[in-house]
């Protein structure tokens, strides 16, 4: 059994239970997140018919009692109430995060006993057990390095296997069990590099890729993390979903790296937190209904709170770029004191006019061009028609993404010359931006492939393509089975903004998630019929690749086809190869 497994299984803390209370496993927080900017542990407690105030009062009492008994008088506790439960958290030293889990569970043990009228365990004995784990987990060399790194203003990244100080070209990494003493470190060789975090419901990946392209155009070695891979320059370090802190650490430890572009998904923020508090800039592209119901994030405003955790990653002079056209972003912005740079499709948006009056930086669309205001003067950056990603201006969501990137690029010091070059070079194709409204020519028709899956992203791409002239329009639709009947109906109705002449409903056999074969295509047909489409306009296919082939057999010169591909992406793309 290795060290980590020993720590994870060191204690089993039993708590009083009841049907109306459910407690998820406590988890480590390694950095800034939804609740605060401190490492520690958090647990999610769900309940019915109990006042949340009673639970939080018990937590404040028992968690404080546990922290003090462990000798963690300098550590703190917090909570967050949501509909149906609470998040309960404690902070802890960075070398005691497994112990923090047991400390949180111990505190909850006494909360649950009092809530349910059960006999609690022996406090002194339970504290002694946690202290035993603390002694095993303690890492004085790590804490010494953290102290000196903070004094020198250089970032330190920690995980179970390695510790690194600095970023990219200014970094050095050591095995967790072979750390140097502070006086053995060449501190003059260590430094941070420009780091940008990108989050939001939609546009994260495109924005991340575009920023990296602009950073490359500036002559720097750039890298990115995403839901698909971690890459430095042209070198893919690993494939997979790396939109969490693990991917960020992998990228930031590569000694070739000069600029880091980090895509951040909701899950990574809520599970572990973010890896640094030394970011140069961050952006929230937008906030919309998607992936609700986990970790106590049940509403879109609560999702906005989670996305805004990126402001806690910012260094002292860091910049938070925000979408002034998004209601939820504007509302949540009222809760942060970050240095905000707004961007908007409307030069007369009140956030833009207000920023200009105050002398704050901002970016906006004016006429047919993208502009940046530096606090004193405005500069025309590029005509929208020269930005391929915008498809001649019809893809307005990509104009917003370009504005977001403009803010990030200026915040990390990239020149307008490089920004213009990157915007003009980056294309909406399978090479630069795979899966995001990629266009193919097939039998004289224009065929677009997009991986959009939520209502917000589907609406954006369908509305953009509906503006393009076409003799006939074809669309391929499919949905995963874990969406409700109403969600499937609503998303289908949204997709019909494309104004298709032919709809092909594809089965997703690998994503039925409890439904029967044929059930989801039937719901798509019902939604289409309810929106005025006739039976002869609706076809079925047994899979996405068969649906795509079915459409490709029918298209003719002058037609447009939109393939919303949720699975079998490789097979669909191969059908379109010349």
Image (spheres, rainbow, N blue to C red):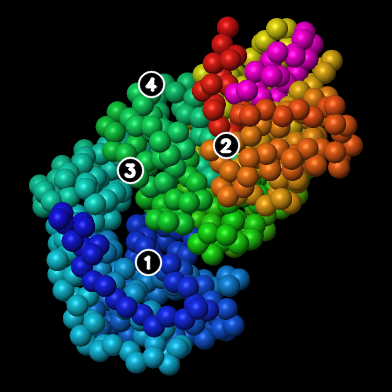
From the viewer's perspective, is the residue at label 1 or at label 2 nearer?
Answer: 2
Residue 405 visible (yes or no) = no
Left or right: 214 in relation to 94: right
Structural distance between the alpha carbons of marks 4 and 3: 18 Å
Q: Is residue 577 above or below residue 458?
A: above
Callout 1 environment at 10 Å: few (<14), some (14 to 19), or many (20+)?
many
Decide which of tag 3 and tag 2 comes sooner along the chain. Answer: 3
For mark 4, give the secondary structure.
loop
Structural distance between the alpha carbons of marks 3 and 1: 23 Å
For mark 1, give the secondary structure.
loop
| Magenta residue span | 545-563
Structural distance between the alpha carbons of marks 4 and 1: 39 Å
Left or right: 84 in relation to 176: right
Which of the 4 image quarters holds residue 108? Answer: bottom left
Disc number for residue 249: 3
Callout 4 environment at 10 Å: few (<14), some (14 to 19), or many (20+)?
few
Left or right: 305 in relation to 139: right
Decide which of tag 1 and tag 2 comes sooner along the chain. Answer: 1
Question: Which residue is disc 4 drawn over?
Answer: 234
Q: Do residues under tags 4 and 1 come within 8 Å of each other at their CB atoms?
A: no
Residue 228 visible (yes or no) = yes
Structural distance between the alpha carbons of marks 2 and 4: 35 Å
Question: Which residue is disc 2 drawn over?
Answer: 509
From the viewer's perspective, is the residue at label 3 or at label 2 nearer?
Answer: 2
From the viewer's perspective, is the residue at label 4 or at label 1 nearer?
Answer: 1
Callout 2 environment at 10 Å: few (<14), some (14 to 19), or many (20+)?
some
* Residue 16 pos. (x, y %): 39, 83
For mark 2, give the secondary structure.
helix
Question: Which residue is disc 1 drawn over?
Answer: 26
């Amino acid at each position: 059994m290795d060290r980590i497994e020993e720590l994870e299984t060191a204690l089993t803390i039993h708590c009083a239970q009841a049907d109306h209370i459910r407690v998820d496993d406590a988890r480590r927080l390694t950095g800034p997140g939804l609740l605060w900017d401190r490492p520690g542990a958090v647990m999610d407690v769900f309940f019915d018919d109990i006042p949340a105030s009673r639970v939080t009062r018990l937590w404040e009492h028992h968690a404080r009692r546990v922290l003090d008994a462990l000798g963690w008088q300098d550590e703190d506790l917090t909570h967050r109430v949501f509909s149906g439960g609470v998040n309960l958290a404690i902070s802890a030293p960075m070398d005691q995060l497994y112990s923090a889990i047991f400390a949180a569970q111990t505190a909850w043990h006494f909360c649950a006993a009092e809530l349910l009228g059960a006999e609690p365990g022996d406090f002194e004995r339970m504290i002694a057990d946690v202290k035993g784990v603390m002694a095993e987990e303690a890492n004085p060399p790590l804490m010494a390095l953290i102290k000196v790194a903070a004094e020198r203003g250089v970032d330190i990244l920690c995980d179970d296997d390695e510790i690194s100080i600095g970023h990219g070209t200014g970094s050095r990494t050591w095995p967790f069990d072979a750390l140097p003493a502070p006086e053995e470190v060449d501190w003059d060789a260590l430094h941070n590099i420009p780091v940008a975090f990108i989050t939001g419901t939609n546009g994260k990946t495109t924005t991340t890729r575009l920023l990296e392209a602009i950073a490359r155009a500036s002559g720097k070695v750039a890298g990115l993390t995403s839901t698909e891979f971690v890459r430095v320059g042209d070198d893919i370090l690993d494939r997979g979903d790396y939109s969490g802190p693990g991917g960020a650490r992998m990228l930031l430890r590569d000694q070739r790296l000069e600029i880091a572009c980090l895509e951040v998904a909701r899950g990574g923020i809520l599970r572990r937190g973010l890896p640094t508090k030394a970011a140069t800039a961050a952006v929230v592209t937008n906030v919309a209904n998607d992936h609700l119901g986990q970790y106590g994030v049940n509403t879109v405003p609560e999702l906005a709170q989670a996305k805004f955790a990126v402001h806690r990653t910012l260094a002292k002079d860091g910049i938070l770029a925000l979408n002034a056209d998004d209601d939820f972003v504007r509302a949540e912005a009222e809760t942060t004191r970050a240095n905000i740079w707004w961007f908007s499709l409307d030069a007369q948006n009140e956030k833009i006019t207000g920023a200009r009056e105050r002398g704050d930086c901002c970016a906006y669309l004016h006429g047919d061009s993208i502009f940046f205001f530096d606090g004193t003067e405005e500069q025309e950056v590029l005509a929208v028609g020269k930005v391929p990603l915008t498809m001649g201006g019809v893809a307005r969501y990509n104009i917003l993404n370009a504005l977001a990137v403009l803010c990030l690029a200026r915040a990390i010091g990239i020149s307008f010359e490089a920004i213009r070059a990157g915007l003009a070079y980056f294309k909406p194709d399978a090479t630069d931006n795979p899966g995001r409204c990629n266009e193919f020519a097939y039998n004289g028709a224009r065929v677009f492939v997009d991986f959009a899956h939520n209502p917000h992203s589907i609406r954006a791409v369908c509305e953009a393509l509906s503006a393009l002239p076409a003799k006939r329009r074809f669309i391929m639709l499919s949905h995963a089975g874990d969406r409700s009947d109403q969600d499937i109906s609503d998303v289908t109705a949204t997709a019909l903004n494309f104004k298709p002449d032919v709809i092909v409903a594809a089965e997703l056999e690998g994503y039925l998630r409890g439904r029967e074969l044929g059930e989801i295509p039937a719901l798509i047909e019902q939604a289409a019929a309810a929106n005025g489409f006739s039976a002869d306009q609706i076809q079925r296919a047994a899979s996405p690749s068969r649906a795509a082939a079915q459409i490709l057999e029918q298209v003719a010169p002058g037609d447009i086809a939109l393939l919303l591909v949720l699975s079998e992406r490789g097979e669909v793309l191969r059908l379109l190869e010349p």
